[in-house]
Image (tube, grey):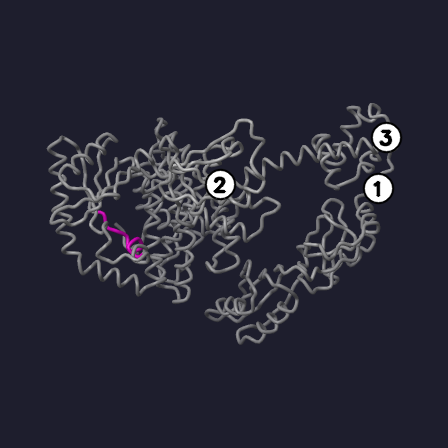
Amino acid sequence: MHKETDIITIEEVLKNARKYITSKKELGIIKKSYELAYERHIGQKRLCGEDFINHPLSVAFILTNIKADYITLSSAIVHETDFSYGELKELLNEDIAHITTEVKKINKLSLSADSEYLIKYYKKILVGLCEDVRVIIIKLADRLHNMRTLWALPLDSQKEKAKETLEILAPIAHKIGINYLKSELEDLSLRYYKPDIYNDILRNLNNTKSERDNSILEMKEFISDILKKHGIKHEIKGRSKSIFSIYNKLNNGKRFNEIYDILALRVYVETEAECYLSLGLIHSKFKPLSKRFKDYIAMPKQNMYQSLHTTIFGIDGQLFEIQIRTYEMDQIAEYGVASHWAYKENNDSVVARKNEMDQKLQIFRNIIESNNDIDSNDEDFVKSVRNEVLNEEIYVYTPKGDVIELPIGATPIDFAYKVHTDVGDKMVGALVNDNIVPLDYELKDGDIVKVNVNKNSKGPNKEWVNIVKTSQAKNRIKTFYTKIDKEINVKKGQELFDKELRKLKIPFSEFNTEKNIKYILETVNEETLDDVYLCIANNKYTANYVINLLYKETKSKEEIIIDKITTTASKIENNKADIIVDGIDGIKISLASCCKPVKGDEIVGYITKTKGITVHRNICPNISKIEERNIEILWNNNIINKYSTNIIIKVEKKENALLSLISKASTSNVNIQTINTINNMDYITYDLIIMVENIDVLNKFIKDTHQMQEVIEVERIIK
């Protein structure tokens, strides 16, 4: 067992990997990854003083303990190098290049758990989960090794990293079922985030350690004798309660001597049948504590965890928690979605587990899908993540005993959509524990839920969107109505189109030829005529514009926008956009990425050919010579948002200069979105993208930053 300060070698990584990777080619790629990383990291040191190469090797070593595949191990070894995607693809392979690139994207966002950029952090984490779970597993192992050497950072940074780990990464490790990483992440986080509480628990545990060890040893021998007499091959280990789980129980009002599972044993047997037989034999000798029995074998948790849990009155009346599981169940309990690496054979249990893993990751896909919805916002997104990923969950049951995992506060509607989309769409009522409940009833842990459906139901109630808690239910309800709305709008667009044909006295049969339709679809870049009708109904373009495409009398999109501006009444008072274009509503507007305007800047609109209106600063060189497609626009003072802009800060090469800048930004209500560091012989340049509410906040931040002792120059730039 390695200690926090141990130096890991590539030989140790390969030795562990050889226990489950037999391909010489795969082992060779791991070795080559090390050689590439070693070359790039020569001379680099970590803050704790060790050679930098020890970090990626330690991450890989951690991953060998969950039997990660060679792609994951190789990606972990090169994840801190400056190799490009193309270089890694050529030197190693495409999978390693892809996973490494995704890990780098997440690592660029090193953020406080209080930061506004938590939103982007969550998105990167969840997108990583959706694309390839190995990206997140590397991130978790990477953070675990960093937490083991957290003592090297300043006290404030220790607390910040510990809080971020505790509130974001450890819960995600739990959600995907990797207890091996989760438990140590939690304990290390508590050690640095709340050291007084951590040390107090540790002191209490140490004070009772000798007594506990004796009791556990005696109980272990007693249970082992029982199982041996009945011919059950087994292994029994004393299970140490994690400090963080004790902290949680103390935090919920328990006293130290009331935490039953500090005295704990884990029994390993070979078959599921032996789990139940062992339980019966233990209960025949020791009285179980009522309401403390859990059968997670018959009803597994949705992170695939399986085990029998019971609390018994053991020797001298002391309470012991006993967990009974097979060796394969233990692999799943420790490694969760990573556990399929441990079993290469293509048997039914492995296939079933991979299917369960895919279903497990669906929660993350649902949240991303929900965030892409037109009505969603960042606040909703963070709320979804916290409710569905980071909070505690409840377990409820179908009448047949199948377990369904839901976030706290979930309703029978959430339950119905978790069972199946059709069940949710046709739901008309629900029974919870045989009692009729309203559809907004908050389900409790252990509830048995029966959904009443009507096969003739026309669909879910539109108002359910405001009741449900899960992204999955929200998405399904919105999808149902989007489909209906689309059908209505297609019909509306077709009616407008037919009306315009009649007005121009053009027979539909003359217009509706294969050649004409093909030309229209290619010109407006749509796939079907229904899509064209939908665009007409949504005012993307008029029926007259489509018809005129064939008669060469069409106006350009720029002319249509200008016509709209001059013919439509202004709706400034109701406008919900950041930018107001007098007389126009519903046109796509975007802020230029070159000059990055913020509220208060003097701006001008540029009518593009395909992307609506782009907003530039008046001084932007990219539009200084273009006037014919420029229009007047205004900032909407009724909207309060933050806007990104680019600044360059040159600083002297002093320790903690970047920390001072980050601190100054935090106190100035300025959020740093990205930092690109450019080293020079005499100074360091930080290329920052920052978020500010308006030009006044920006100017004050630039002025205040310029007055800092270590700052040489501050400049807002246009790229």
> What kind of residue is marked 1?
Lys
> Looking at the image, which is closer to me, 441 or 275?
441
The answer to whether the residue labelled 1 contacts the one labelled 3, judged by CB atoms less than 8 Å apart, is no
Q: Does the magenta stretch include residue 245?
A: yes
- Residue 711: percent from the left, percent from the top? 55, 72
- 10 Å neighbourhood of mark 2: few (<14), some, or many (≥20)? some
**Regarding mark 3 in the picture, which secondary structure is present there?**
helix
Q: Residue 439 carries which label?
A: 2
Q: Mark 3 points at which residue?
A: 502
Answer above or below: position of 40 versus 523. Answer: below
Residue 451 appears in which quarter of the rendering? top left
> Looking at the image, which is closer to me, 414 or 204?
414
Left or right of 227: which side holds 544?
right
Q: Residue at x 51, y 50 (%)?
A: 105
Magenta residues span 239-247
> What kind of residue is marked 2?
Leu
Q: Name the residue under label 1.
A: 555
- Residue 353: percent from the left, percent from the top? 38, 33
Q: Earlier in the sequence, mark 1 or mark 3?
A: 3
Left or right of 203: which side holds 413?
right
Q: Which mark is residue 30?
A: none
- 10 Å neighbourhood of mark 3: few (<14), some, or many (≥20)? few
- Residue 477: percent from the left, percent from the top? 56, 38
Q: Is residue 373 visible?
A: yes
